[in-house]
Image (spheres, rainbow, N blue to C red):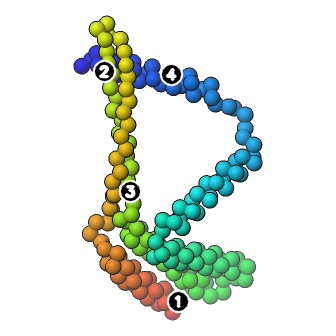
């Protein structure tokens, strides 16, 4: 058993030294030009946007639009207070609190509705080491396997129940803010 552990550690060290020596020669310390960095950023944004529009359901897109609206409304209220003043301060606090509270409730609804569409990918590695009679390593094989499974966090909550919870919490939030404004 101890010999196997030592052999595994030697194999990992040899593998790391081989990977490190070949990897070090490919690394360039010169800075990348800004044009290539901007090009990579544009590619990443285009890929993200295309993936967003091709995979998202209309319900989630509608929720995302409402989230953007709430953020814009909160920012506009904050700018108004900075530029004009905060004479009815409780009105500003109520309006800003309703934006933040509704945003939080919407994000919660989005997470609960989108729960069944999340996938969990894991990679498992298995190391096979062949040791000859002298105790030296002859061969190292690394086998990788990808495991894809759907992971549900909110197993007992249906989308209809999540929406009903959202409506109930929104009504309570609005009731509290209306009484705060007086």
Is any part of residue 9 visible from this angle? no
> Could you say where residue 153 lies in the image, as x and y percent from the top left?
33, 62
Residue located at (31% from left, 21% from top): 5
Q: In which quarter of the image is residue 113?
A: bottom left
Q: Which of 67 and 55 is in front in this view?
A: 55
Judge depth for marks 2 and 4 and give the one in front: 4
Q: Distance between the residues labelled 1 and 4?
A: 68 Å
The residue tagged with tag 3: helix, strand or loop? strand
Of the two numbered discs 3 and 2 on the same chain, state the one appearing first in sequence: 2
> Could you say where residue 172 lies in the image, as x and y percent from the top left?
40, 85
Q: Name the residue under label 4.
A: 18
Q: Please identify the quadrant where the N terminus is shown.
A: top left
Q: Name the residue under label 2.
A: 5
Badge 2, how many Cα within 10 Å: few under 14, some, many 20+?
few
Q: Distance between the residues labelled 1 and 2?
A: 69 Å
Of the two numbered discs 2 and 4 on the same chain, state the one appearing first in sequence: 2
Q: Mark 3 points at which residue?
A: 119
The residue tagged with tag 4: helix, strand or loop? helix
Of the two numbered discs 1 and 2 on the same chain, state the one appearing first in sequence: 2
Of the two numbered discs 3 and 4 on the same chain, state the one appearing first in sequence: 4
Relative to 169, does residue 116 appear above or below in the rendering? above
Q: Name the residue under label 1.
A: 181
Contact, mark 3 vs mark 2 (Cβ under 8 Å) = no
């Amino acid at each position: 058993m101890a010999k196997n552990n030592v052999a595994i550690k030697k194999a990992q060290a040899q593998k790391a030294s081989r990977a490190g020596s070949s990897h070090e020669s490919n690394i360039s310390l010169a800075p990348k030009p800004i044009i290539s960095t901007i090009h990579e950023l544009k590619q990443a944004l285009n890929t993200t946007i295309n993936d967003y529009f091709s995979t998202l359901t209309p319900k989630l897109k509608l929720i995302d639009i409402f989230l953007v609206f709430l953020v814009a409304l909160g920012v506009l209220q904050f700018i108004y207070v900075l530029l004009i003043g905060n004479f009815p301060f409780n009105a500003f606090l109520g309006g800003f609190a309703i934006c933040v509270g509704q945003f939080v409730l919407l994000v919660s609804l989005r997470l609960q509705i989108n729960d069944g569409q999340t996938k969990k990918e894991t990679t498992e590695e298995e190391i096979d080491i062949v040791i000859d009679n002298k105790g030296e390593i002859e061969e190292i094989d690394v086998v990788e396997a990808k495991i894809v499974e759907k992971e549900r966090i909110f197993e007992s909550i249906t989308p209809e129940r999540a929406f009903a919870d959202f409506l109930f919490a929104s009504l309570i939030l609005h009731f509290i803010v209306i009484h705060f404004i007086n």
